[in-house]
Structure formats: structure tokens, C-alpha cells
Image (cartoon, rainbow, N blue to C red):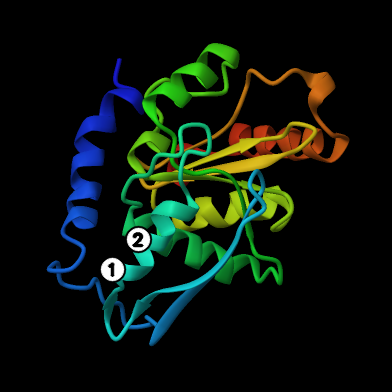
């Protein structure tokens, strides 16, 4: 059976091809692209803050991505990787759609294979083949905006995976792998807030009423 995990290698190669050719690759210009794109972020675990313009003068900024790599490093191993330009664009667009005045609070960005394996052994919510290991995924906490709003924005953009984890400290996973969306099913009911239970029920009802013509 084909899953997100079996698609990782091919999608990662395509996405990282842009990252590794950051300086020489032509910019992906859109008609509505602004002159500059700036992200405001804060790390939930280190407390570090970063305000950075990663896109300017019609191209991605190499120096900015070097700083992004360090800001989004694996804090357990203090290692880095090149972060996907497409992921930064996704974050920028989510920021525009949610219109939050807060910085993007990041719970997890890059993970080394060692860290991801350790986390996967602790929890079923961690994918052993996570896109975090390729600089293609980020987890955003409720300190930025309502998780359901972030999840809906990511689904609307439809440019990768969007996962909603309604724990006591809810967060949203976004990545630039294959398009997919999910609410993590392994989280027990006692760990869910009432409002997120209502959201799950509403989503299940909407899915049940979807006709073949709507799909």
C-alpha cells in the first residue's frame, strides 16, 4: 500500500533540489508575490526569536537560509540542514491567511535521524520517516494562532501535508511533501479539549455528507 512514508524519497529529492540549488536556481515568481517576504518566528524550546527577510529582489536570500538553518536546528544534537524554500513560502502564506499578530511559534523543525528515531519510540504520533529530517516540515503551536485556523489555512493552500494534533498543548504539523491532511487518531479522548472534540465531530459529519460529485 502506498503511504506518505513510501513517497518520501521521491518528493524529498524534488523539493531539496530547489534548496541545494538555492543561489543559481531561478526564483519562482508569482503575479501576487510581494517585493519582500519576511517571517517572524520564535522557538518554543530555545526561546530564540528571529525576524528575517528570506525573499527579496526577486529571489531567495542565501544568507537568510543560513540563519534559518541554525534557528531551526535540532536542539538535541545541535545539527542543521538546509530548510526547504517551499516550506518558508508555505509558512509565509499561512501567516497571511491567519493574520495573526504573534510570531510563528515553532515546536519542532529540523530533526536528525537520531532524534526522530528516539521520538518515534516514545510516541505513535511521530512518523519514523518524518519530513522533519529533510528540512521539509514544521510543527506550529497554539501560541501563534488557533490551531484549527492554522490547520484550515494549510488545507486551503493544499501544498503538502497538514496534520492536526489536538492535545492539551495543541499544534499543527505542516510539510511540503505529498498533499495530505489528517487529525491524529492515536490521541486519547481524555487528552482532547472540548472545542477540538467539537471540531472533529463537525469534520466527520462534513466528510460523511460529501457526495462523489463533490470529491
Establish if 142 lies above or below 60. Answer: above
Q: Check the picture and name the quadrant holding the N terminus.
A: top left
**Label 1 belongs to which residue?**
62
Confirm or deny contact between disc 2 and disc 1 (CB under 8 A). Answer: yes
Dot 2 falls on a residue whose secondary structure is helix
Q: x, y (%) of residue 165?
A: 65, 34
Dot 1 falls on a residue whose secondary structure is helix
**Label 2 belongs to which residue?**
66
In the image, taking residue 48 as reference, residue 83 lies left or right, namely left
Q: Going 38% across and 82% down the picture, which residue do you hit?
A: 32
What is the distance, in whole Å, between disc 2 and disc 1 at their CAs? Answer: 6 Å
Q: x, y (%) of residue 197?
A: 79, 33
Say the numbered circle drawn on residue 8. none
Q: Going 24% across and 55% down the picture, which residue do you hit?
A: 19
Q: Going 46% across and 58% down the picture, which residue do you hit?
A: 157
In the image, taking residue 183 as reference, residue 178 lies left or right, namely left
2 or 70: nearer the viewer: 70
How many marks do you count on the picture? 2
Q: x, y (%) of residue 178?
A: 34, 40
Q: Residues within 10 Å of mark 1 (few under 14, many from 20)?
A: some
175 or 66: nearer the viewer: 66
132 or 190: nearer the viewer: 132
Establish if 119 lies above or below 32. Answer: above
Amino acid at each position: 500500500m502506498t503511504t506518505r512514508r513510501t513517497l518520501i524519497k521521491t518528493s524529498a529529492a524534488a523539493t531539496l533540489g530547489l534548496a541545494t540549488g538555492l543561489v543559481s536556481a531561478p526564483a519562482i515568481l508569482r503575479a501576487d508575490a510581494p517585493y519582500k517576504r519576511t517571517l517572524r518566528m520564535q522557538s518554543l524550546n530555545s526561546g530564540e526569536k528571529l525576524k528575517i527577510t528570506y525573499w527579496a529582489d526577486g529571489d531567495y536570500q542565501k544568507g537568510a537560509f543560513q540563519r534559518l538553518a541554525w534557528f531551526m536546528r535540532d536542539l538535541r544534537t545541535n545539527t542543521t540542514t538546509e530548510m526547504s524554500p517551499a516550506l518558508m513560502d508555505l509558512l509565509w502564506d499561512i501567516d497571511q491567511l491567519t493574520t495573526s499578530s504573534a510570531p510563528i511559534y515553532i515546536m519542532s523543525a529540523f530533526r536528525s535521524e537520531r532524534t526522530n528515531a528516539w521520538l518515534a519510540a516514545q510516541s505513535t504520533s511521530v512518523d519514523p520517516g518524518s519530513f522533519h529530517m529533510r528540512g521539509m516540515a514544521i510543527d506550529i503551536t497554539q501560541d501563534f494562532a488557533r490551531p484549527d485556523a492554522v490547520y484550515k489555512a494549510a488545507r486551503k493552500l493544499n501544498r503538502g501535508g497538514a496534520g492536526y494534533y489536538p492535545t492539551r498543548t495543541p499544534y499543527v504539523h505542516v510539510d511540503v511533501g505529498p498533499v495530505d491532511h489528517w487529525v491524529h487518531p492515536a490521541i486519547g479522548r481524555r487528552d482532547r479539549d472540548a472545542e477540538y472534540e467539537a471540531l472533529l465531530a463537525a469534520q466527520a459529519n462534513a466528510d460523511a455528507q460529501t457526495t462523489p460529485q463533490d470529491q
